[in-house]
Image: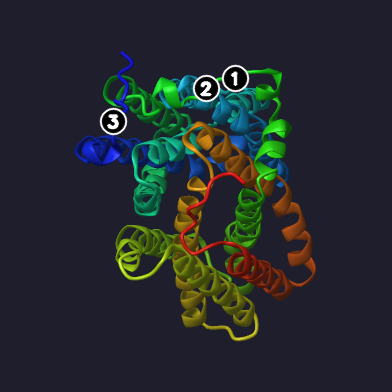
């Protein structure tokens, strides 16, 4: 069944949109629980096929392969969703993840793990498609709020998933991967039976050419729009600064503070709670009093301060400083990323939402491929310098956003 939202005024369909957005948030929560279930098990699964001193190399290779596949596939899947609708592409993406995790569970050889990651990566368009879907069914001024709910749904899933994964993995190392596949398959059933198509035929992209399956042609098109380019460049600096924290922080705590898994796990739970609070509770209230640009710049500034505090904690050993740094980083990232997604969605028309969100996800994948190696090199020589660099990168994003991005974000293409 392929129901389609009618083309009449979106303001007259707010009740229907709330129903649809509720389904999307449920789907995202299920997916997030599924993905976070398997995270604690990856080192143990890889260790079945590699000696202990090569496990980190194997894990890095698996992550890089997935990121590389996502880099090339996301803009293409986004463009296809602009042409054929969000629902079909979302189903393909979810079913690709189901296949990938089933293959992971079966495994039997290292190359099978890589096959699972490749299949999942080549079909990894669910997040960008969901963002495009929300852009289709909401008014521009509402999108930031709903993007915040989407982010908080991801955070809710991440809270309980790792503990559940550890329990399931103690029974059988492959069991969490099958459970994840089941959860994502349930999500695909919800999409098929409950989720209407959001992009009506008259609003879809009319042309499908060879360029539509060329990742770099989508980059060229999106970056040809000056204001879109400036927003994306700001996002690149933001994700680079935040990525340094995400890729390095657990290693930092282990090396500098001699923390073990238990303390790190507690802190990561605080991260999840803070992320949910910022996106689902704090942000909607701030939007009642401040414009998106003010909130975004405040978020970037708070993020930069948090990164600087981690640098300070190298010299001033204090759990309080580390805790403050984490709260600042997660709160700042939550405020900026959500408003950034809202402004980005307002920069093009509906027929280009999928392509734009695909390019944005592709840029994040490029960040995941390239950043860990450079960050590891700097950290090896001077841990404090790594977070000083991250703070400077984020402050660069503050400058670009302050100078070039308008207060409302309400512009189209050129």
* Residue 170 image point, x, y percent: 42, 39
Q: Earlier in the sequence, mark 1 or mark 2?
A: 2
From the image, tell me which residue sits under label 3. Answer: 8
From the image, tell me which residue sits under label 1. Answer: 207
Q: Quadrant of residue 214?
A: top right
Q: Quadrant of residue 360?
A: top right
- Label 2 packing within 10 angstroms: few (<14), some (14-19), many (20+): many
Q: Going by the image, does 7 lie left or right of 123?
A: left
Q: Which is nearer the eye, 109 or 33?
A: 33
* Residue 219 image point, x, y percent: 69, 38
Viewer can see residue 124 = yes
Residue 83 - label: 2
Viewer can see residue 263 = no
Q: Going by the image, does 28 lie left or right of 8?
A: right
Q: Earlier in the sequence, mark 3 or mark 2?
A: 3
Q: CA distance from mark 1 to mark 2?
A: 7 Å
Mark 1 or mark 2, whichever is nearer to me? 1
* Disc 3 element: loop
- Label 3 packing within 10 angstroms: few (<14), some (14-19), many (20+): few
Q: Which is nearer the eye, 390 or 113?
A: 390
Tally of numbered discs: 3
Q: Are marks 1 and 2 in contact (CB under 8 Å)?
A: yes
Mark 3 or mark 2, whichever is nearer to me? 3
Q: Going by the image, does 135 lie left or right of 124?
A: left
Residue 1 - label: none
The residue at the point 33 percent across, 63 percent down is 277
């Amino acid at each position: 069944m392929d129901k389609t939202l009618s083309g009449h005024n979106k303001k007259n369909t707010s009740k229907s949109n709330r129903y649809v957005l509720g389904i999307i948030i449920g789907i995202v929560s299920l997916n997030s629980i599924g993905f976070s279930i398997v995270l604690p098990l990856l080192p143990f699964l890889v260790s079945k096929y590699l000696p202990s001193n090569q496990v980190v190399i194997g894990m890095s290779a698996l992550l890089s392969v997935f990121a590389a596949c996502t880099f090339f596939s996301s803009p293409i899947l986004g463009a296809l969703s602009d042409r054929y609708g969000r629902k079909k592409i979302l189903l393909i993406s979810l079913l690709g993840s189901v296949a990938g995790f089933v293959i992971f569970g079966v495994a039997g050889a290292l190359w099978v793990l890589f096959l699972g990651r490749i299949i999942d990566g080549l079909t990894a368009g669910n997040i960008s498609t969901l963002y495009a879907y929300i852009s289709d069914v909401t008014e521009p001024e509402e999108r930031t709020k709903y993007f915040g709910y989407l982010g908080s749904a991801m955070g809710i899933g991440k809270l309980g998933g790792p503990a559940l994964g550890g329990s399931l993995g103690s029974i059988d190392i492959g069991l969490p991967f099958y459970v994840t596949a089941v959860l994502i398959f349930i999500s695909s059933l919800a999409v098929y039976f409950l989720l209407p198509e959001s992009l009506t035929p008259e609003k879809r992209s009319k042309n499908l050419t060879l360029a539509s399956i060329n990742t770099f042609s989508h980059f060229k098109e999106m970056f040809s729009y000056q204001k879109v380019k400036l927003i994306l460049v700001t996002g690149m600096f933001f994700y680079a600064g935040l990525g340094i924290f995400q890729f390095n922080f657990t290693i930092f705590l282990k090396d500098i503070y001699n923390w073990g898994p238990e303390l790190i796990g507690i802190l990561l739970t605080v991260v999840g709670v803070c992320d949910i609070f910022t996106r689902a509770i704090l942000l909607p209230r701030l939007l009642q009093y401040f414009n998106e640009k003010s909130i975004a710049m405040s978020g970037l500034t708070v993020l930069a301060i948090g990164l600087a505090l981690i640098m300070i904690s190298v010299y001033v050993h204090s759990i309080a400083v580390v805790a403050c740094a984490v709260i600042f980083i997660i709160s700042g990232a939550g405020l900026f990323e959500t408003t950034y997604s809202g402004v980005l969605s307002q920069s093009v028309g509906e027929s280009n939402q999928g392509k734009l969100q695909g390019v944005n996800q592709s840029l994040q994948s490029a960040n995941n491929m390239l950043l860990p190696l450079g960050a590891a090199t700097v950290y090896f020589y001077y841990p404090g310098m790594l977070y000083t660099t991250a703070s400077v990168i984020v402050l660069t994003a503050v400058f670009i956003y302050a100078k070039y991005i308008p207060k409302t974000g309400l512009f189209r293409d050129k």
